[in-house]
């Protein structure tokens, strides 16, 4: 068995995993009830695009995905190896920063829908 064969096999199993995930995304209850995107809508599809290596598509689907993932990674790393100050100053600052990105992104998205709806009506 060559290393090339192994690489192809790993790549294919990764494709199967991504394909499986694409068919098992969690539907958004807020969107189901209201018909309007919530501030988190698009995150799963964006992460799927990241898994497939499509950075541009990932950003187009949900711009705060990468900052959010980095924030989660920091949170997990901090739980195991204490990285933060005793008052969690870094975590609080990152939370405010990433939260602002999510909020601005959501306002831009909803504003875009509003403009589209106004011009097409
Ligand atoms: Zn949603």
Image (cartoon, rainbow, N blue to C red):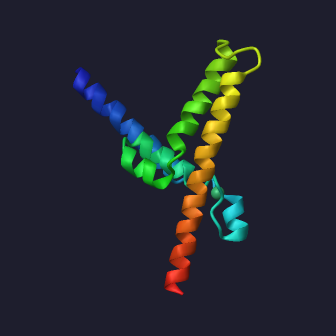
Q: Residue 61 location, x and y as percent?
A: 48, 54
Q: Quadrant of the C terminus?
A: bottom right
User: In this orientation, which residue lies closer to the viewer: 26 or 85?
Assistant: 85
Residue 83 placement: quadrant? top right
Residue depicted at x 65% and y 19%: 78
Residue depicted at x 44% and y 54%: 60
Q: Quadrant of the N terminus?
A: top left
Q: Residue 28 location, x and y as percent?
A: 66, 58
Please tell me whether residue 28 is drawn above or below residue 87 in the rendered image: below
Residue 93 placement: quadrant? top right
Residue depicted at x 35% and y 38%: 12
Q: Is residue 110 visible?
A: yes
Apparent side of residue 120 relative to residue 27 in the rendered image (left or right): left
User: In this orientation, which residue lies closer to the viewer: 24 or 107?
Assistant: 107
Please tell me whether residue 27 is drawn above or below residue 86 in the rendered image: below
As drawn, the residue found furthest toward the right would be 87
Residue depicted at x 71% and y 60%: 29
Q: Is residue 1 visible?
A: no
Q: Residue 84 location, x and y as percent?
A: 67, 17
As drawn, the residue found furthest toward the top would be 81
């Amino acid at each position: 068995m060559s290393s090339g064969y192994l690489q192809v096999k790993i790549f294919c199993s990764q494709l199967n995993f991504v394909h499986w995930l694409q068919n098992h995304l969690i539907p958004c209850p807020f969107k189901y009830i209201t018909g309007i995107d919530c501030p988190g809508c698009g995150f799963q599809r964006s992460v799927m695009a990241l898994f497939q290596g499509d950075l541009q598509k990932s950003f187009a689907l949900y711009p705060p995905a990468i900052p959010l993932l980095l924030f989660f990674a920091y949170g997990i790393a901090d739980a195991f190896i204490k990285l933060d100050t005793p008052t969690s100053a870094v975590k609080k600052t990152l939370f405010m920063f990433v939260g602002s990105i999510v909020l601005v992104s959501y306002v831009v998205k909803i504003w875009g829908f509003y403009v589209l709806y106004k011009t097409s009506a």
